[in-house]
Image: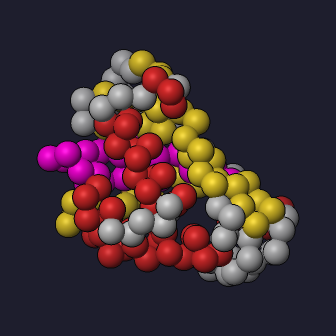
Amino acid sequence: MRTLVAVGVLGVLCATTQAQASGLGDRILKANDELFHKGNLAYVEDAFTPGYTVHADGQSTPVGPHGIRDFVTAMRAAFPDLRVEIEVLVEDDDKVAWLRTHRGTFETDCLGVKATGKPMMWQTLIVTRHEDGKIAEEWAVSNFGEQAEKE
């Protein structure tokens, strides 16, 4: 089990619900809807910087927009009925911290995990940094692998 401890990353924060999201939080909501629900891969160019970098599993990887397109394509193929819900949004300056809950039927192997053919739910905690109106960098912790093993 992984634990994420973030001290002082966002300073003093105010939590908002999905319905109350504004500014940077609205960008997160729109990107998730366009990419995961609608499959609008063209939206990647509008939402992410060319040097977009993801920090996960102790690695920092500049993946750019092509990496986002590949990730979304893989997730939508593995979970054809995928639904993503943003449960928490916290905003401060150029950052948003948020919790994303994914639900879907695991139909095709994904991210090195063997498909189960069963419904699955997992969560990802993400801190997103924005630059010039686009998503530039994200730090993510997910229980995807652990949840898949439980199924």
Give residue 91's quadrant in the image.
top left
The one nearer the camera, 40 or 105, is 40
Give residue 103's quadrant in the image.
bottom right
**Does 113 appear in magenta?**
no
The one nearer the camera, 6 or 110, is 110
Could you tell me if residue 139 is visible in this image? no
* Quadrant assignment for the C terminus: bottom right
State whether the magenta stretch is mostly helix, strand or loop.
Answer: strand
**Does 131 appear in magenta?**
yes
Give the residue at x 81% y 74%.
116
Give residue 27's quadrant in the image.
top left
Could you tell me if residue 76 is visible in this image? yes
Give the residue at x 40% y 47%.
30
- Percent across and percent down for residue 129 are 29, 45
- Percent across and percent down for residue 42 are 33, 68
Is residue 21 found left or right of 53 in the rendered image?
Answer: right
Q: As displayed, is residue 114 above or below residue 29?
A: below
How are the colours assigned in the image? secondary structure
Give the residue at x 66% y 70%.
80
Is residue 62 found left or right of 117 in the rendered image?
Answer: left
**Tag count:** 0
- Percent across and percent down for residue 3 are 60, 44
- Percent across and percent down for residue 50 are 20, 66
Is residue 123 found left or right of 66 in the rendered image?
Answer: right
Give the residue at x 58% y 70%.
76
Q: Which residues are magenta?
A: 122-140
The one nearer the camera, 26 or 110, is 26
